[in-house]
Image (cartoon, rainbow, N blue to C red):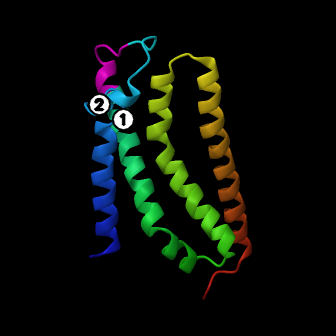
Amino acid sequence: MKTQTKVAIVTLVLGIVAFLTEPNGPLGAFWAPAPSVPQAIGVQVPFFMLLGVFEALSFGLGVAFLLYGYSPLKATFSVSTPLARAAHLSIAWLLINWWAHDSLHLHNGMNLNGLLGIEYAFHVTLIIAGAILARFFVALVRVPSPA
């Protein structure tokens, strides 16, 4: 089976599971929205659902990239193994985090201690991932391309 097919299957299967297990999804009761979180109404409902679809598919794609992305990344670019692995994990995290991130925001509501934990766990690690990818990019532009 081609890698592209595997990526598509993992993305779709995990995307569907992630969508069903979001806080407002039929299987998401374990992190149901806090009572203080207002309910979407009217035209907001499909827009929040569409956002959930994007986050769920991003989660699936991130896991697929985690499974199948390192070898092509390392084979294509002449960077150190630790930097290639850090870039690989950073890209995966940038894709994976949104499903849990938004779900935890809904579950936590406006509990500031919980909010601080969420912000540090996600925002700081996303900043670190961005810095790693910036370093990766700088390493790429400094290395001459193979002829």
Q: Secondary structure at mark 1?
A: helix
Q: Which residue is mark 2?
A: 25
- The magenta stretch spans residue 45: yes
Residue 140 quadrant? bottom right
The front one of 47 and 1 is 1
Residues packed near mark 1 inside 10 Å, few (<14), some (14 to 19) or many (20 plus): many
Q: Position of residue 46 (x, y in %)?
A: 29, 26
Q: Nearer the viewer, mark 2 or mark 1?
A: 2
Q: Which residue is mark 1?
A: 52
Q: Are marks 2 and 1 in contact (CB under 8 Å)?
A: yes
Residues packed near mark 2 inside 10 Å, few (<14), some (14 to 19) or many (20 plus): some
Q: Quadrant of the N terminus?
A: bottom left
The front one of 15 and 54 is 15
Q: Is residue 108 above or below residue 42?
A: below
Q: First in sequence: mark 2 or mark 1?
A: 2
Residue 17 quadrant? top left
Q: Which residue is most to the front?
A: 30
Q: Is residue 140 above or below residue 38?
A: below
Query: What's under tag 2, amino acid-wise?
Result: Gly
The front one of 89 and 2 is 89
Q: Residue at x 62, y 45 (%)?
A: 126
Left or right: 57 as drawn, with respect to 66: left
Q: Residue at x 46, y 11 (%)?
A: 36
Q: Position of residue 29 (x, y in %)?
A: 33, 28
Q: Which residue is most to the bottom?
A: 147
Q: Tell me the magenta residue range.
A: 39-47
Tell me how far mark 2 sits from mark 1, CA to CA. Answer: 10 Å
- The magenta stretch spans residue 131: no
Q: Residue at x 61, y 67 (%)?
A: 85
Q: Quadrant of the C terminus?
A: bottom right
